[in-house]
Image: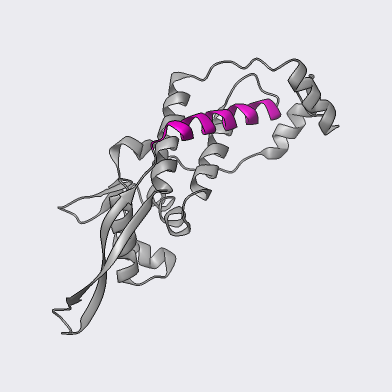
């Protein structure tokens, strides 16, 4: 059955409606989020004296940041969204496919970043070190280092007045979009009822 479906697609490629301006903007933002979320942060250990305890502590200063340009990610995410639309038997990309793409982007980040970024929508777009400690069960030094890494990657910015951290303005929408429950069963029902050469029957 799979081979027959692949042959059908290769013989008569499905024609999808072009993405809307808003969808293209969303995919572009997700591509930037992906590129920065997978970026490399190089650090160097430094010694400093804790003024409160008088003990020597270690901190990690950022020495270099390597971030790939998002052009390749844009094409990959757009291809993924369109492929999902074809599999779901749709005439074009919908919010459902965009939401799946967003989940793929978040799961492609390094583990700690993938845990922190989804917290921003839950906290109204503002996070503190205490929020991270409460949510992830880590100490203040770990939370501080994670925030430093996210700042270096230009994923977040710090409010100098409140001390809170917020998403960087150019990817704020990509970070602040919440992932709702997804009805995959509904997709399969649609594909069963409205079968075409490019829809998989179940």
Q: How many numbered dots are placed on residues in this image?
A: 0
Quarter of the image with the C terminus is top right
Task: Give the residue furthest to the bottom.
Answer: 54
Residue 112 lies, in percent from the top left, at 44, 59
Q: How is the image coloured?
A: one colour
Range of the magenta residues?
69-87
> Which quadrant: the N terminus?
top right
Quadrant of the image occupied by residue 3 = top right
Where is residue 13? Give x, y as percent: 70, 17
Q: Residue at x 33, y 65 (%)?
A: 143
Q: Is residue 64 visible?
A: yes
Q: Is residue 109 above or below residue 34?
A: below
Does the magenta-highlighted stretch encompass residue 49? no
> Does residue 179 appear in the picture of this structure?
no
Is residue 119 toward the left or the right of residue 183 in the image?
left
Q: Is residue 77 magenta?
A: yes
Q: Main secondary structure of the magenta part?
A: helix
Q: Residue at 44% across / 23% down in the picture?
A: 22
Task: Give the vertical position of 141 relative to 103 (above or below).
Answer: below
* Residue at position x 17%, y 78% in the image: 50
The residue under the point 52% across, 20% down is: 19
Q: Is residue 51 above or below residue 85?
A: below
Query: Please, is residue 18 above or below residue 36 in the view?
Result: above
Is residue 115 rendered to the left or right of residue 195?
Answer: left
Q: Position of residue 105 (x, y in %)?
A: 50, 43
User: x and y percent of residue 191 in the render?
Assistant: 76, 27
**Based on the displayed image, in which of its 4 quarters is residue 47 positioned?**
bottom left
Front position in the image: 131 or 201? 201
């Amino acid at each position: 059955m799979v081979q027959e479906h692949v042959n059908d697609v290769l013989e008569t490629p499905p024609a999808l409606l072009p993405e809307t301006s808003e969808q293209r903007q969303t995919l572009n933002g997700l591509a930037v989020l992906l590129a920065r979320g997978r970026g490399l942060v190089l650090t160097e250990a430094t010694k400093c004296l804790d003024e409160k305890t008088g003990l020597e502590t270690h901190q990690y200063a950022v020495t270099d940041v390597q971030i790939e340009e998002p052009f390749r990610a844009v094409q990959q995410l757009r291809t993924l969204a369109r492929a999902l639309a074809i599999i779901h038997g749709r005439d074009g990309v919908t919010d459902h496919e965009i939401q799946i793409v967003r989940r793929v982007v978040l799961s492609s980040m390094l583990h700690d970043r993938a845990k922190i970024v989804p917290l921003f929508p839950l906290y109204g777009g503002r996070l503190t070190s205490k929020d991270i400690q409460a949510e992830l069960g880590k100490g203040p030094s770990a939370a501080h280092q994670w925030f430093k890494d996210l700042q270096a990657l230009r994923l977040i910015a710090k409010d100098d007045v409140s001390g809170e951290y917020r998403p960087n303005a150019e990817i704020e929408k990509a970070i602040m979009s919440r992932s709702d429950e997804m009805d995959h069963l509904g997709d399969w029902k649609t594909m069963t009822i409205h079968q075409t050469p490019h829809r998989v029957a179940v």
